[in-house]
Image (cartoon, grey):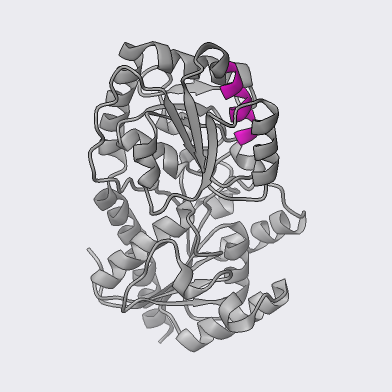
Amino acid sequence: MIARPRHIVFLLSGLGAGGAEKVINLIARHRADAGDTVSVLALNGHPVQSFFPYADPIRVRTCENEAGKTSLLGRLQWLRRTLADLRPDLVVSFLTKVNVLTLLASLNKPWPVIVSERNNPQAQPAHPLWPYLTRATLPRAQAIVMQTEAAKATLLPRAAEGAHVIGNPCTLTRARAPVGDAASRFVAVGRLADQKGFDTLIDAFAYVHQTRPDATLTIYGEGPLRDDLQSQITGLNLNAVVHLPGLSTSPGDWIDQGDSFVLSSRYEGFPNVLAEAMAAGMAAISTRCDWGPPELIADGENGLLVPTDDPQALGSAMLRVLQERALRERLATSAKASAATRFTLSSILDQWDQVIDSTLASRTRRARQAA
């Protein structure tokens, strides 16, 4: 049950095609539809360029648009100034560095802050300052949302007391056509960065190509390793069968471009694309990376899990899916059934409503006690 309308500000790094951007878009639109005043603040990008569209009455503002490409201190000052101008009832922040800046910008301010970790800060490279600042500021959050139980278990006891586990929703609604006998198209999705392990995936596909030259691999996404990955593809003589088309034209369009899905990540927070592929009824293969895949996939039941950074193990799993139709169909059917029961949009939004409304209620009680 959503409480009386309030002003909620959502904060994130940018407005691109990532999982955090998608989830904030869904929650923001949900709360606006329920009558809340909703603002979205991003540090990077421009409001009109959001991959996930926002409609009135949600207002989108960005630091880059209003203050230019400023320093870290400049971003903090913009954030503190903008929040003071908006005077929200609640702030909801996503991602490690944004969480730290949001909590610093909210020091000695009346609004409560909910922070959500969307990646694996233990694995992602960062200056030593950020782990220190995270430990120092995180206890100041009124609530913490993690995406998996494994992620929650890494929190210090003082921070874990206010932590909740909420996965990400699957929003795919269209049906996929039956795959049939061929099932020779693999698809992967993610930022072209080291985290996603696409170099390992390309090596694995070279192994697959030796046995199944008819198979193809399409990797959707953009990022700093595009040139390196393209050089790797060329060096392995895979230009005819491995493609890097960039971002999909609209959210979820990649679903129709593959028969089976591969996640090759070295680490994750919660792999949205894996959950979406499973919900769409795709046979899925994933690395057993921290965090997420082991909580989504029961190996051999609704997908296949392989070690990280092991091209031969990944390639062997891909060949199994190609060559064993009964396995492929069983994995796809089980994946769709498990995703349908665990990650429905209504269930995830209900969980977010509970955290948001309880945080707002706590603020109201504290204000009355102070009076």
Which residue shows up at 43% across the image and 44% down it?
272
Q: Main secondary structure of the magenta part?
A: helix
Which residue shows up at 62% across the image and 64% down it?
100
Position above or below: 140 against 22: below
Indicate whether residue 95 is drawn in magenta: no
Indicate whether residue 205 is drawn in magenta: yes
Report the front residue among 108 and 248: 248
In x, y percent, where is residue 122?
65, 44
- Would residue 307 be found to the left or right of residue 351 on screen? right
- Would residue 193 be found to the left or right of residue 46 on screen? right
Position above or below: 29 against 369: above
Q: Which residues are magenta?
A: 197-207
In x, y percent, where is residue 354?
31, 59
Report the front residue among 201 and 346: 201
Q: Give the image quarter of residue 314.
A: top right
Residue 217 in view: yes
In x, y percent, where is residue 55?
32, 73
Which residue shows up at 58% across the image and 83% down it?
66
Position above or below: 345 against 48: above
